[in-house]
Amino acid sequence: MTRSGSRAVSDIVSFTLVFSTIIFMIGVVTVTGLGTLGDVQEGTESNIAEVTMLNYATTLSDHREGIDRRSTTIKLQGHSLELTNSWVNWSVPGETRTNMSTGALVRTTDTDTELVYQSGALFRAEDGGGGVVVRQSPFRCGERTAHLAVTNVTGEFSISSDRRVTLESVRQDQSITTRNATSVNVSLDGAEQSDQWNDALAGDWEGSGDEYTCESIKHVVVHETTVRIDIVQ
């Protein structure tokens, strides 16, 4: 083979190797990029769901302030939304424990992230464990008074949709109970996401696990509001 022929073969081999390398890199970047885009999309959907639930938690708190009826339209993005049974208990020295049904509003995303509303608090729990407090509990332990603001959500629905749905919430009952007491105990053994409740009550409340106590007080105020939620569209 002549020198020019050898050079031509060498050029063809070099071109083939370079071209193959480029095609391989494009394939790697494409596959990796698609995976990353998928992760970003899933994360964005969960973040949007969190903001939606946070806004709805604010809407429900309006009922405690005196609003009788609200209608809120949200897009579920294919997620599920359901009302589940849930409760907390409280007691003061010398009296039996009082059970309060609170209910819990649970939104589950495509990645099994749960956004849980219970009695004014909102938690985000990830599939496989771990979570954060998105909206703090309205349970307060002060220097003289413990204040338990309880919102009981009732209703019967479990829905999954990629369209917009309208939630109508109506305040059904409200009561304020005051006790003279030196301490109050709150039990969360019937609550959703007790791990996140731990984070929500850490600080002024003493305790761990499911039992918390507010001590060295003079009064306990329990502000209980019952709200019924129905899907009307």
Image (cartoon, rainbow, N blue to C red):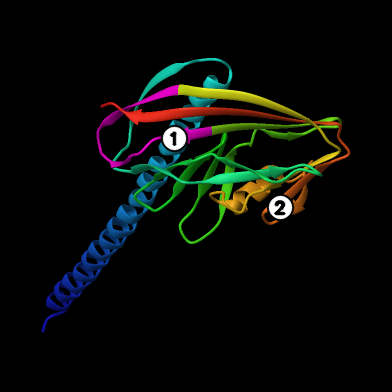
Residue 163 pos. (x, y %): 25, 33
Mark 1 neighbour density, 10 Å: few (under 14) some (14–19) many (20 or more): many
**Residue annotated with mark 1:** 154
Say which amino acid is labelled 2.
Glu
- Observer-nearest residue: 176 or 95? 95
Reply above or below: 53 against 88. above
Reply above or below: 76 against 109. above
User: On residue 211, which mark appears?
Assistant: 2
Q: Residue at x 10, y 84 (%)?
A: 1
Membership of 165 in magenta stretch: yes
Q: Residue at x 74, y 48 (%)?
A: 212
Query: Which residue of the protein is positioned furthest toward the bottom in this rendering?
Result: 1
Quadrant assignment, res 215? top right
Say which amino acid is labelled 1.
Thr
- Which quadrant is the C terminus positioned in? top left
Q: Residue at x 25, y 38 (%)?
A: 162
